[in-house]
């Protein structure tokens, strides 16, 4: 860590985090003429794409769309090489943006914000860091990420293990050499599903400890060609327009009126999408995520694929998800995941049948067996959506702590702002669609909204913005109602906080339609639901 003097001073805005949300926030706010400073815990930009560098890591949204939309120059200058970009390439993109737009100089790296407190006498945020910085800022933008704090489940005996333990979300910078090693992998979400095939290619033996099987579909990744770019450019204006539609969203109103497609029609469509690759199955029928009769067929389809791919029937059965609908836990997009279980050196352990007992000095003990292992990989996910916010001591009016304010579950008007926390903006916070869709586009929309809002305030000489508690309540009720009208609550997902012991079970993302449209409408009506003084 490079030495530097602690900072003091006053800024118009502070931005916490230099992932895609933070980078754009710094850019937009500076363009407005604000004095702005960013803090980032990592030594580099990129946020979650800096930390997640496990083998096989890629984005499961096509790279042409997993890109900023705010700069036509950037779109022309940057060329993605593959349909689904690797972490390396996404990180290079973030670095390119930081340098191309001169954002890097605004950021203090290797600096973790520890606290932010609102000073009511002066209407200003006091922000402290682990490097001793104490700065003051009128506006505080939390771009600290939805999937940035690793979930490290406490497994008895972990401290006794003689080998190395890795977490997918904190992978070492130098590639890990697994050759000749026996590796245990705990967790089969998106990270595990991507990492397992590559670890299996390198290691002597891999034992996968699965608690809940996930639905996974093949990515069918490939190099991008000129024709892909031509098609993308032709479709792009309509894509941008669709984002602003009152019907844009994961579940739109059509879902509740659409006819139930026949099993044959569904099967045909799922087969086409399976061959095409990627997560298109989620968009196959409008009522896939609202009607069990539709969803059941999709589940059967994927289970049949698993039974066709995986040769050992017992392993195939254990890998087959059941008891919850497809798509209501984040669907996994893989390359050779199910095929990997046909390898001689890979074994699946079904923790539902033989629960994990403890980690020992030499491996993992389940209720039935001891596995001798040289290295362990935790692919156990994140304390999603609230983890990074709770890692800071954020205090609003009357020194109210965010952890206290959200002890029964998060509440945020539009997922962007919180009553009693004036001039605090959360990029892709709970109550916004964020993780349900394309995160980079979600980050941009939030940043545009908050930057326009700050601009509006400055032009009118306004000092303070905070949501009306009633508007916040109504929004969170709407978020909960929308989730309840779908199949989403039928799985124990991280969307619900179910992966973290003691976390309140509140469905956090907004799954309904017209979110962006509504945000724009609220702004156009002079920030309806907000108190501006
Ligand atoms: O984490 P997860 P992830 N003992 O929470 C298991 C994004 N992402 O890092 O389901 C045993 O999905 C847990 O089991 P269970 C994407 O949004 C995107 O994989 O709780 N097992 C589960 O199998 C994704 O959804 C990309 O029963 C334990 C696994 O660990 C999100 O990040 C790539 C356990 C965790 O799965 C999170 O994905 C990667 C325990 N004590 C991530 N605790 C792409 O863009 C947990 N598990 C492709």
Image: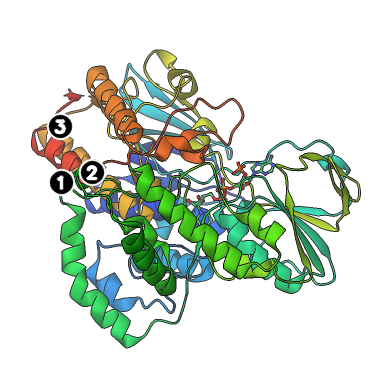
Q: Nearer the viewer, residue 82 or 35?
A: 82
Q: CA distance from mark 3 to mark 1?
A: 18 Å
Judge whether 279 appears above or below 500 on screen: below
Residue placed under numbered mark 1 in the picture: 246
Residue placed under numbered mark 2 in the picture: 513
Question: Can see residue 415?
Answer: no
Q: Residues within 10 Å of mark 3 (few under 14, many from 20)?
A: some
Query: Badges 1 and 2: C-beta atoms under 8 Å apart?
Result: yes
Task: Indicate left or right for 268 with 317 as reference.
Answer: left
Judge whether 473 appears above or below 526 on screen: above
Q: Position of residue 509 (x, y in %)?
A: 37, 39
Query: Badges 2 and 3: C-beta atoms under 8 Å apart?
Result: no
Residue depicted at x 25% and y 41%: 450
Q: SS class of the residue under badge 1? A: loop
Judge whether 26 appears above or below 55 on screen: above
Task: Indicate left or right for 330 with 97 as reference.
Answer: right
Q: Position of residue 492 (x, y in %)?
A: 53, 37
Q: How is the image coloured?
A: rainbow
**Residue 471's image quarter?**
top left
Q: Nearer the viewer, residue 426 or 372?
A: 372
Residue depicted at x 21% and y 63%: 239
Residue depicted at x 43% and y 79%: 81
Q: Nearer the viewer, residue 96 or 441?
A: 441
**Residue 415's image quarter?**
top left
Residue that sits furthest to the bottom in the current view: 226
Residue placed under numbered mark 3 in the picture: 527
Q: SS class of the residue under badge 3? A: loop
Residue depicted at x 56% and y 44%: 5
Q: Position of residue 382 (x, y in %)?
A: 56, 43
Q: Which quadrant holds the C terminus?
A: top left
């Amino acid at each position: 860590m490079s030495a530097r003097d602690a900072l003091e001073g006053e800024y118009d805005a502070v931005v916490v985090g230099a992932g895609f949300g933070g980078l754009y926030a710094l850019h937009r706010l500076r363009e407005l003429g604000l004095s702005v400073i960013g803090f980032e815990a990592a030594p580099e930009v990129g946020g979650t794409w800096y930390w997640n560098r496990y083998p096989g890591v890629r984005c499961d949204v096509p790279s042409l769309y997993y890109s900023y939309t705010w700069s036509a120059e950037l779109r022309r200058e940057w060329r993605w090489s593959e349909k689904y970009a690797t972490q390396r390439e996404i990180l290079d993109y973030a670095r390119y943006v930081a340098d191309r737009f001169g954002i890097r100089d605004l950021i203090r790296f290797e600096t973790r914000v520890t606290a932010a407190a609102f000073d009511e006498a002066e209407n200003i945020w006091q922000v402290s860091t682990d490097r001793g910085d104490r700065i003051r800022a009128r506006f505080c933008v939390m771009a600290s990420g939805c999937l940035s704090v690793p979930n490290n489940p406490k497994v008895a005996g972990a401290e006794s293990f003689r080998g190395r333990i890795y977490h997918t979300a904190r992978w070492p910078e130098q590639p890990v050499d697994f050759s000749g090693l026996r590796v245990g992998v705990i967790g089969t979400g998106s990270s595990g599903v991507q990492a397992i095939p590559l670890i299996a290619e390198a290691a002597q033996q891999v034992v996968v400890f699965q608690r809940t099987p996930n639905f996974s579909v093949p990515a069918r990744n490939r190099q991008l060609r000129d024709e892909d770019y031509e098609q993308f450019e032709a479709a792009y204006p309509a894509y941008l327009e669709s984002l602003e539609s009152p019907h844009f969203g994961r579940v739109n109103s059509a879902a509740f009126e659409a006819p139930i497609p026949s099993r044959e029609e569904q099967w045909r469509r799922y087969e086409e999408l399976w061959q095409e690759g990627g997560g298109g199955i989620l968009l196959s029928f409008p009522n896939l995520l609202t009607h069990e009769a539709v969803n059941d067929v999709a589940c059967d389809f994927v289970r049949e694929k698993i039974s066709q791919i995986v040769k050992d029937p017992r392993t195939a059965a254990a890998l087959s998800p059941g008891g919850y609908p497809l798509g209501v836990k984040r669907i996994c997009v893989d390359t050779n995941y199910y095929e990997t279980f046909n390898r001689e050196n890979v074994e699946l352990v079904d923790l539902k049948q033989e629960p994990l007992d403890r980690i020992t000095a030499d491996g993992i003990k389940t209720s039935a067996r001891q596995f001798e292992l040289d290295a362990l990989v935790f692919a156990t996910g994140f304390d999603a959506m609230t983890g990074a916010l709770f890692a800071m001591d954020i205090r609003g009016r009357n020194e109210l702590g965010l952890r206290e304010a959200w002890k029964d579950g998060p509440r945020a008007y539009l997922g962007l702002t919180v009553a009693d926390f004036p001039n605090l903006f959360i990029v892709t916070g709970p109550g916004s669609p964020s993780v349900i869709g394309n995160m980079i586009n979600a980050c941009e929309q939030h940043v545009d909204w908050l930057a326009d809002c700050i601009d509006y305030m400055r032009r009118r000489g306004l000092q303070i913005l905070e949501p009306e508690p009633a508007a916040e309540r109504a929004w969170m009720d709407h978020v909960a109602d929308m989730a309840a009208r779908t199949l989403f609550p039928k799985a124990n997902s991280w969307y619900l906080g179910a992966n973290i012991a003691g976390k309140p079970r509140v469905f956090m993302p907004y799954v309904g339609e017209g979110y962006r449209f509504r945000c724009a409408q609220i702004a156009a009506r002079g920030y309806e639901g907000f108190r501006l003084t």
